[in-house]
Amino acid sequence: MTLSMTFGGVAAALILTAPGAAALAQPALAVVLKPGRMDEAKGQGSLAVELRFSELPASVGAPLLSLPLVIANTATVADTLTGLTAADDAGPIPLVVKDDPATGLVWSRHWLAGRATRGPVVVRYLAPVDNTPPTRGSGPPYALRTEGGGVSGVGNTFVLLPEEKIARKITLRWDLADLPKGSTATSSFGEGDVALPDGPASQLASTVFMAGPMKREPGVVSETGFSSAWMGTPPFDPAPLMAWTNRLHGWMSGFFQDKTVPPYRVFLRYNPINAGGGTALTRSFLTTYGADTKGESLKGTLSHEMVHTWTDSDAGQWYGEGVAVHYQGLLPFRAGLLSPQEFLDDLNETARRYYANPLNDTPDAEIAPRFWEDTRIRVLPYDRGGLYFAVLDGRIRKATGGKRSVDDLVLEMNHRFAAGRRADDAAWIALVVRELGEDGRKLHEGMMAGALMLPEPDDFGPCFTRTTAQVRRFELGFEPKSLVGTTKTIRGLIAGSEAAKAGLKDGDVVTYAVAMDAVQGDPDQTLTLKVTRDGKTFPLTYLPRGEATSVYQWARKPGTESLKCVY
């Protein structure tokens, strides 16, 4: 899953370049990152950060800098960084810490100015790099970590930022003196030392940073088009997978009518607790693998996140994630990069998880407040959203005799957003009503209310038809909210559940190292909890499944071997 942060209303700000100067200049920010030597055995290290602001005005008691303490269930360095100093023309600036309440998807630490600032401001601190699995559990792979003697992470977990919306001239410089010989650096904005587009400092929050003995595909990196980077030794060879992704990126660029060749970077990292997941960020995608990950298994994730590059909108998560699920298998299938069976496998995984989900009738309005407490809630914008687009696509094709499809609506939303026109839920509904009349409005309202989204048997082209299968529902066997927070204590154990049969008890403190969303989608995947009870810690493994239920699936029609299956 993905989390994006946008900042509107950016205003230009002009300051004097020097006392008495006649010329006016845009505020500037120079960022210097100096990774320390990494201890690979311990999985630890440090990253020195220096921020030089041409000016950073703040009155006494006003916020000077901030960093999330927790963002999308991911802890940052806000509580563990050391050596934080700030100084201006008048000397050191005293800093006072103020924390937000620990609620919602993001809560932050703010450093308030102990006095009014004057002139240029220089901020320095040391961010720890630690590969210890996160105690909070599953979340986006933002945090700093080390691999192969290098370091990588996303700015929202280690770059302190001013609370402002002014445009700045921003530069990034690396000091790699302490990294292994031959190390290089890259980020979402380019190779090595770069100048970012003029804009708010907040763009650093959605930037991926990587430095060390990197491996690349293609080997010669261009400032436009596709590139990828990774470090260490993944359990598969990433080069063929990244070559596949490169071809898909070019095909998608044409499908989405992109007249430019935008830079697009994929960063691969190990993830101890949510392998296979990833997140879309500025001009880039950060994807992860585990100890047993196979490269082929990442194709859907890479395709899904790439779709986000061209489908920005102001609509809800049902749109952003739903459209990405709809296209994650379909577009590589159309491009000849997935076989019909691979397309079916992707479709059926989504369908199986959705139709077996006992909470699939949860209204859309209830998803955000419960997003992190239960994986069955968390996957609904993806699964229900994706099947909604399939239903809508089938209806539009039938209504227009195949002359139009949901592609036309998505492309129009893209054009509206790019032109600064309205591209929100209301705009989408208007497009649907234009195609299907009030039946289209009813379909959309039903989806938002939790109605079952069921494509017709032939909605996925001439080669496939709808069938049914039996599958056991995902069931943890205890209250899912037990897995939320730093300390995870089992509550609400269900008597007779697989968890209870395996020996789990109320009051057990547990940790786990798998992506719960993926476990929900695979009916054969077991769950291993590391259980602490009465001072002893031991593993407990079971199949988190309950009663059997019937689910809809799609299968290849006999006699369609000679047909062109792409629709």
Image (tube, grey):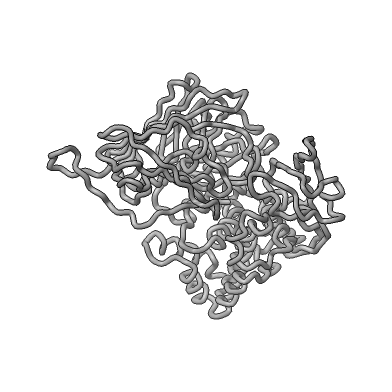
102 lies above or below 266: below
- Which of these two is toward me, 445 or 551? 445
Q: Tell whether 223 sits left or right of 75.
A: left
Q: Residue furthest bottom?
A: 438
Q: Tell whether 505 sits left or right of 439.
A: right
- Which of these two is toward me, 109 or 31? 109
Residue in the image at 82% along x and 60% along y: 470
Residue 309 coordinates in the image, percent (x, y): 48, 51
Residue in the image at 74% along x and 55% along y: 479
Residue 424 coordinates in the image, percent (x, y): 46, 66
Work out whether residue 287 can be spotted: yes
Image quadrant in which the C terminus is located: bottom right
For the image, the number of numbered tags is 0
Residue 341 coordinates in the image, percent (x, y): 70, 52
387 lies above or below 175: below
Q: Residue furthest top?
A: 181
- Which of these two is toward me, 116 or 293? 116
Q: Tell whether 465 sits left or right of 218.
A: right
Work out whether residue 276 can be spotted: no
Residue 66 coordinates in the image, percent (x, y): 42, 44
Residue in the image at 48% along x and 19% along y: 181
